[in-house]
Image (cartoon, rainbow, N blue to C red):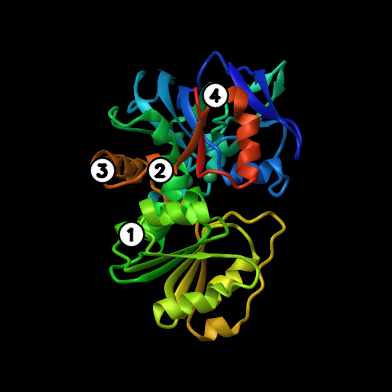
């Protein structure tokens, strides 16, 4: 099968033949990929901000159809439509058994061991499977807990985005922050995740939702389709915090940093009302450090990390599918372009340039 392989940071993605094992382990499934989204986290690896073993196949929000199941897999069947999501959980550790699979402490239990044939290889050399998914490929061999079976009425291309952009964004607002009716919310960064934070805040009943971005196009999309009530176009000389305070009577209840820029956490704190919360949703580079005035803490403000919107895949993804099918959840407007695997390099370049909302590679 063909996959897009990255050999070194700053390198190109090479479309090449890659092998998957002929035999599945008892708890694995084989999936023919239908679609995969291009996400800024993939870009972080390509740009060397997040160091990972190479060569590697990236891609961590995917969908597909199951073509084979291992001997001990009882609740997934050949032909099932699935979302493959980077929240791959062991199901047995303290965090998993207390309903927090996104914080799983034993992800290695969902990978193949050192002595076993790798899930991906080329000419006998292991190709790493990023986030346990490696969706930039025509076929995925996955741990059973990497997939969630979904309603077959759900369009498979749109379903791919449920695994990262939608789960992280909507989950950050609804589950993690617990945005409540009447709240004032700010979302810094209106990309695939940020638009979904806006959407999640709107679904939770927030009264004021202020989207902040450099791109007028994204801000327009946030307001037209994702529930933002106000927009602030960020540029040199624009005091975002002052604008937010003027719009919200002293600051927002929840401010979401959905860019992954350490310097924006301080801006977010400035825009937060006394006693309010900053939620760091964006993925920061390995070397990132965050600097902010300790006085914010004495104002009762909190800064909280967010991981995958605290996604519980088996529970939350079917709920998101149901909301889409009922016309409650916006997905189509997230898609900038649909491209074939051969054009993934151009898709990555466009992502780096900040174009579009979400590019989907469709197989
Ligand atoms: Zn992602
Ligand atoms: Zn676990």
Residue 119 visible in the snapshot = no
- CA distance for labels 3 and 1: 14 Å
**In contact (CB < 8 Å): disc 4 and disc 3:** no
Instruction: Characterize the local packing of mark 4: few (<14), some (14-19) or many (20 or more) Cα atoms within 10 angstroms.
Output: few
Residue under circle 4?
340
Measured along the vertical axis of the image, is residue 84 above or below residue 211?
above
In the image, 56 versus 206, the foreground residue is 206
Q: Nearer the viewer, mark 1 or mark 2?
A: 2
Q: State the residue at coordinates (31%, 46%).
A: 329
Residue at numbered disc 1: 202
On the picture, is 119 further left or further right than 193? right
Quadrant of the image for the N terminus?
A: top right
User: Is the residue 159 above or below the residue 272 in the image?
Assistant: above
Labels 1 and 4 touching (C-beta < 8 A): no
Q: CA distance from mark 1 to mark 4?
A: 33 Å
Mark 4 and mark 2: span between their CA atoms?
Answer: 19 Å
Q: Quadrant of residue 309?
A: bottom left
For disc 1, the neighbor class at 10 Å (few under 14, some 14 to 19, many from 20) is: many
Residue found 57% across the figure and 24% down from its top: 341
Name which of mark 3 and mark 2 comes first in the sequence: 3
Label whose residue precedes the other's in the sequence (1 or 2): 1
Q: Residues within 10 Å of mark 3 (few under 14, many from 20)?
A: few
Which callout, 1 or 4, points at the residue further toward the start of the chain?
Answer: 1
Q: Nearer the viewer, residue 346 or 252?
A: 346
Residue corresponding to mark 3 = 327
């Amino acid at each position: 099968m063909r996959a897009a392989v990255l050999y070194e940071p700053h390198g190109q993605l090479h479309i090449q033949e890659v092998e998957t094992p002929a035999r599945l382990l008892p708890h694995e499934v084989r999936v023919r990929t239908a679609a995969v989204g291009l996400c800024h986290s993939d870009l972080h690896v390509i740009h060397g901000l997040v160091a990972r073993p190479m060569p590697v196949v990236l891609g961590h929000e995917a969908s597909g159809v199951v073509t084979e199941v291992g001997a001990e897999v009882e609740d997934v069947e050949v032909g099932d439509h699935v979302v493959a999501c980077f929240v791959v959980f062991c199901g047995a550790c303290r965090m998993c058994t207390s309903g927090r699979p996104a914080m799983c402490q034993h992800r290695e239990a969902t990978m193949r061991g050192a002595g076993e044939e790798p899930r991906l290889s080329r000419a006998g050399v292991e190709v790493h499977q990023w986030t346990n998914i490696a969706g930039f490929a025509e076929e995925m061999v996955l741990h059973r807990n990497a997939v969630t079976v979904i309603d077959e009425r759900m369009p498979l291309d749109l379903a791919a985005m449920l695994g990262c952009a939608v789960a992280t964004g909507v989950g950050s607002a609804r589950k993690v922050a617990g945005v409540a009716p009447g709240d004032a919310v700010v979302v810094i960064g209106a990309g695939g995740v940020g638009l979904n934070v806006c959407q999640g805040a709107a679904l939770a009943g927030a009264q004021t939702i202020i989207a902040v971005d450099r791109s007028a196009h994204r801000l327009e999309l946030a307001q037209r389709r994702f529930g933002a009530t106000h927009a602030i176009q960020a540029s040199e000389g624009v005091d975002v915090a002052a604008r937010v305070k003027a719009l919200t009577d002293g600051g927002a209840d929840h401010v979401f940093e959905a860019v992954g820029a350490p310097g924006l956490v301080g801006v977010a704190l400035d825009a937060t009302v006394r006693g309010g919360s900053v939620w760091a949703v964006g993925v920061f580079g390995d070397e990132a450090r965050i600097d902010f005035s300790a006085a914010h803490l004495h104002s009762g403000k909190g800064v909280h990390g967010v991981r995958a919107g605290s996604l519980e895949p088996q529970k939350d993804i079917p709920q998101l599918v149901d909301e889409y099918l009922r016309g409650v959840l916006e997905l189509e407007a997230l898609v900038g372009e649909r491209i074939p695997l051969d054009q993934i390099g151009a898709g990555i370049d466009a992502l780096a340039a900040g174009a579009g909302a979400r590019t989907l590679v469709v197989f």
